[in-house]
Amino acid sequence: MMKNIRYIALGLSLMVALSGAAQVVDYYSTVNYGISVPLGDTKDFISNTSFRGFSFEFGRFFTEEISVGFLFAWSVFNESFPRDTYELEDLTLTGNLYRYINAFPLMASGRYYFSPDSKFRPYLGLASGAYVINKVSDFGVHRYENKNWHFGLAPEAGIIFGIGTEAYLNLGARYNHAFKSGGDTHSWLGVQAGVTFIY
Amino acid sequence: MPWILVTTIPVLMMSCYPGGPSTAEDIDIVGTSYDKEFDFSAASSFSLPDTIIHMVGNGEEDSLGRDYDIMIINRVRDQMISNGYTEEPLDTLNPADVVMLISAMSSTNSGLYFDPAWWWGYWGWWPGWSGYPGAPVWGPGWGYGYPVGYPVYISYSTGTLFITMIHPESTNIDEKTIGVPWMAALNSLLQTGAQNTEQRITDNIDQAFKQSPYLKTN
């Protein structure tokens, strides 16, 4: 647990160090709906794209261009495999197999926004911190669960578009990489759309 | 940083499992295991007691009905015959090569698993044993010699059906075990209130034999 908190703290301090001297005191909050496309080992386990995801972010701008904040997200991947026969050492088993991944990024996030005076503000960012990933296989009445905390990095790119004095539409993509923990490495590409308030 | 708690608590509490099993057959499992040393082609006859033993935990009521007993026994018989075995009647001087024992777990105690030492307690009464040369030495405390060398701990939910092929000639007096060349566990089969129970039982018994092609002697 301490190690996990350290991941988050490390991420936060990195971002604060990046932000430099405070010039602007604007806060922001974002709510996004997200779609996630599994990659790598995650895709080997579940190949379906996840349409169940959301993220919530808040933080502050330190300059017109630089923001630092906290990101929490939840993505649910699932795939069911039709009735099939599996050989497991000395056992032969026939049944339906259901797989699930519940992924929860808990990260510090830093962004650089271009074009301060424009309504369209593209941004680049990097999030760093912890992923809690619960990987589950259900076979009949049996559940095999592997839940781990991972250290992870998530570079991102996106754009916000002003639709009111404080309101913006947000559209972005984020590559999530959760480094090996408990024998598993996970990665997926998230595409998210939502609303950002800067106030 | 109370917001860390606010967001961490749901992480520790929740997971979502969409698109999971929706019908009883979605959670049916058929498990089989066999003794790789056993020569199935050398066995040509079988006997089948006309009873399904309900294994009940200490102090528990037998919660399983017997509506499907005859159907289950008949289906196992049909499968054995179609795999090339001939049924032998009981109490002959020339007993069958293998005996098929059918049991069902009737227990709501999730901590209870299939205890091989119960074997004698549940099947000792069967008159067919008198035909086997090893039979007189068997008694309480005798268990199954598992095909894989250890008991198969599929989590046995209430209603799990076991089909066990016994080879009485493979008796190990030192270990106090009787040979089990093959066994099948049909999980979650006899759950009360489930739909299509008859069809599921039939399909799952058929599947147990289908995924065990080495049983074929014809």
Image (spheres, rainbow, N blue to C red):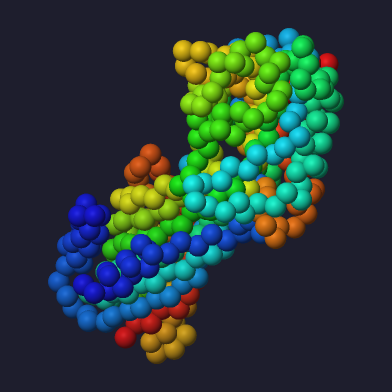
Residue at the farthest bottom position: A165
Q: Residue at x 24, y 74 (%)?
A: B2
B155 or B122, which is in the foreground?
A: B122
Write down the quadrant of residue B1 in the picture. bottom left
A124 or B159, which is in the foreground?
A: B159
Lateral position of residue A173 relative to residue A13, left or right:
right
Residue at the farthest left position: A21
A189 or B28, which is in the foreground?
A: B28
Q: Residue at x 57, y 54 (%)?
A: B61
Write down the quadrant of residue A58 in the picture. bottom left
Residue B98 percent coordinates (x, y): 71, 19
Lateral position of residue B175 relative to residue B99, left or right:
left
Q: Is residue B74 above or below residue A159?
A: above
Tell me the quadrant of the picture where the N terminus of chain A can be found: bottom left
B34 or A76, which is in the foreground?
A: B34
Residue A181 percent coordinates (x, y): 34, 44
Q: Is residue B138 above or below residue A161?
A: above
Q: Residue at x 71, y 23 (%)?
A: B128
Tell me the quadrant of the picture where the C terminus of chain A can be found: bottom left
Residue A56 percent coordinates (x, y): 39, 72
Can residue B38 be seen?
no
Q: Residue at x 45, y 47 (%)?
A: B111
Can residue A68 be seen?
yes
